[in-house]
Image: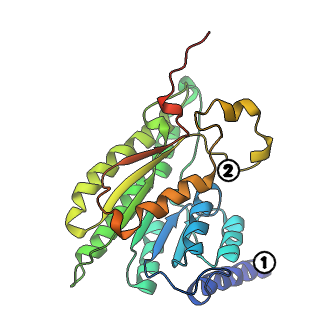
Amino acid sequence: MADNYIERQFEQYQAKKAAWQKPLKHTSKKTNSKRVFITGGANGIGKAIVKAFRQKNYPVAFCDKDETSGLQTAKETGAAFYLVDIQNKEALENCMLKIIKRWGDIDILINNAGVSLFSDLTETSVEDFDQILSINLRPVFITSRLLAIHRKAQDSPQHYGRIINICSTRHLMSEPGSEGYAASKGGIYSLTHALALSLAKQHITVNSISPGWIQTQEYELLRPEDHTQHPSGRVGKPEDIARMCLFLCQEENDFINGENITIDGGMTKKMIYIE
């Protein structure tokens, strides 16, 4: 057990060292000066976001509770991985403080981490409901608040900042048994525009992205009807969300603020009747 622990610690060290010292292979030589922190970056949409920013040579750090996938993503991309359970306020804050100490600041914060848990209303306990909020919603406030505290304490004001919160189309539409998830995403939707106003003086824009159906694995196993029901003619991919994150972080796009951007292939605009 001890040997295995030491091996894991060494792997984490190597992954972090790579992020600080080595550019991602096959990218341009120009290093982007904007520093990026992503929650839940080991898998799915989060991993696509990590890859997208590293391909543009941004310095990237991410956290996740999935150690195996986190280390693999760090190895593939050169991003720095931190093993964190975002339900733990102290662990999440300590992670951000370590990154700020190393970099001096965080320019781009992407709150992506979350869980999709659904259960019948009568079988969902209050504790179940609280747990979903503690994973999906509460960390968005924790990270945004800490970044605001850091920025406010600086002698020289920064004139660039981005916060992007990954919401969901379920903030405005639901299925039975989705109370906790819908509430958490609705909270992110509202928290986003509140943060946009609170952080305006610090030149930090805050926007959210609401993905629709984004298939994160085994895309090739989808049925033709899965694709054709979308006005865009296909199910979404994680890269669709990652590209919007890059777009929002361009310096000239600072006039997009307090918004929620839906990326769902047109599904929420489609009227559906049973024939």
Q: Nearer the viewer, residue 215 or 10?
A: 215
Residue in the image at 45% along x and 77% along y: 35
Q: Nearer the viewer, mark 1 or mark 2?
A: 2
Residue in the image at 43% along x and 84% along y: 103
> In the rendered picture of this protein, how many numbered marks are placed on residues?
2
Disc assigned to residue 225: none
Q: Where does the image place residue 141, in percent across and percent down from the top left?
A: 36, 56
Q: Is residue 226 left or right of residue 257?
A: right
Residue in the image at 44% along x and 73% along y: 96
Q: Where does the image place residue 12, in percent across and percent down from the top left?
A: 66, 79
Q: Where, by quadrant of the figure, is residue 225 drawn?
A: top right
Q: Where does the image place residue 144, in percent across and percent down from the top left?
A: 35, 62
Q: Nearer the viewer, residue 203 or 198?
A: 203
Q: Secondary structure at mark 2?
A: loop
Marked residue nearer the N-terminal end (1 or 2):
1
Q: Residue furthest top?
A: 275
Q: Residues within 10 Å of mark 2 (few under 14, many from 20)?
A: some
In this picture, is 147 found above or below 20? above
Q: Residues within 10 Å of mark 1 (few under 14, many from 20)?
A: few
Inspect the image, locate mark 2, and give the three-letter code of the amino acid beneath it: Thr
Inspect the image, locate mark 1, and give the three-letter code of the amino acid beneath it: Asn
- Quadrant of the snapshot with the C terminus: top right
In this picture, is 229 found above or below 205? above
Disc assigned to residue 216: 2
Q: Where does the image place residue 95, in percent across and percent down from the top left?
A: 48, 73
Q: Is residue 4 left or right of residue 142?
A: right
| Res 129 seen here | yes
Task: Return the residue at label 1.
Answer: 4
